[in-house]
């Protein structure tokens, strides 16, 4: 999207990764995890070696084609070993997005179809709040009072799908419990 935005004469949002790097360097945690779009550069923080993994939600038991990059930084350069399914959906649903629509992953990356179009064929139809919640792995009656419906959709769409979050959390726990992690700490 960055190329389309710039080609139309608009500026993209600022790159916030340098601020993330600064905060991590100041806080000096034992480890950090950054989630972003697959095309995002890896964070560079002095004293940390960063390993990354790109995941699709349906590879880890989710329903959607949501594709994200997770950058894991430790002094020892520990790797995330995210457990993926041997058999997963071949027709994932489109990902719930913060702007209310949905997006699919390209076929080459495990996706299979385009988002549904509106009746006039012009644009992807906007998803309802219950659809956003379901696609992200939340109960359809999930609520965030006192936000407006639009703000609820944005908050849910900005999140990591529940199945993906659980898989990455298990991988972080596994990496940190390895004998080499205990020796490095």
Image: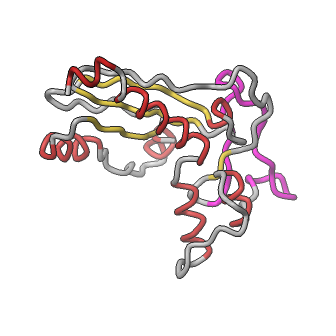
Q: State which region is magenta.
A: 100-124
Q: Where is residue 101 in the image (x, y as percent from the top left)?
A: 67, 55
For this orientation, the residue located farthest to the right is: 119
Residue in view at x 68 percent, y 25 percent: 85
Q: Where is residue 82 in the image (x, y as percent from the top left)?
A: 52, 26
For this orientation, the residue located farthest to the bottom is: 146
Q: How many numbered marks, from 0 up?
A: 0
Residue 146 belongs to magenta span: no
Q: Where is residue 17 in the image (x, y as percent from the top left)?
A: 29, 42
Q: In this view, does 57 lie above or below 129?
A: above
Left or right relative to 7: residue 183? left
Query: Quarter of the image holding residue 164?
Result: top right
Residue 113 belongs to magenta span: yes
Q: In this view, does 93 lie above or below 172?
A: below
Q: Position of residue 25 (x, y in %)?
A: 15, 40
**Foreground residue among 108 and 140:** 140
Residue in view at x 35 percent, y 38 percent: 33
Quick one: quadrant of the C terminus? Answer: top left
Q: How is the image coloured?
A: secondary structure
Residue in view at x 65 percent, y 29 percent: 59
Left or right relative to 76: residue 123? right
Query: Quarter of the image holding residue 78?
Result: top left
**Foreground residue among 75 and 63:** 75
Residue in view at x 59 percent, y 71 percent: 150
Q: Is residue 153 above or below residue 182?
A: below
Q: Is residue 96 above or below residue 64?
A: below
Q: What secondary structure is the stretch in magenta mostly built from?
A: loop
């Amino acid at each position: 999207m960055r190329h389309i935005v710039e080609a139309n004469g608009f500026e993209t949002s600022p790159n916030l990764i340098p601020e993330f790097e600064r905060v991590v360097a100041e806080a000096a945690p034992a480890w950090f995890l950054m989630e972003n779009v697959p095309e995002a550069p890896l964070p560079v923080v002095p004293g940390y070696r960063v390993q990354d993994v790109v995941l699709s939600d349906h590879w880890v038991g989710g329903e959607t084609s949501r594709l994200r990059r997770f950058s894991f930084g430790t002094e020892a350069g520990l790797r995330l070993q995210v457990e993926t399914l041997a058999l997963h959906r071949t027709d994932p649903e489109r990902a719930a997005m913060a702007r209310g629509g949905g997006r699919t992953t390209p076929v080459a990356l495990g996706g299979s179809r385009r988002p549904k179009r509106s009746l006039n064929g012009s644009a992807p139809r906007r998803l309802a709040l219950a659809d956003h919640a379901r696609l992200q792995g939340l109960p359809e009656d999930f609520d965030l009072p006192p936000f407006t419906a639009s703000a609820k959709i944005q908050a849910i769409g900005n999140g990591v799908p529940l199945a993906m979050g659980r898989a990455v959390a298990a991988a972080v726990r596994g990496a940190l419990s390895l004998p080499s992690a205990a020796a490095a700490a």
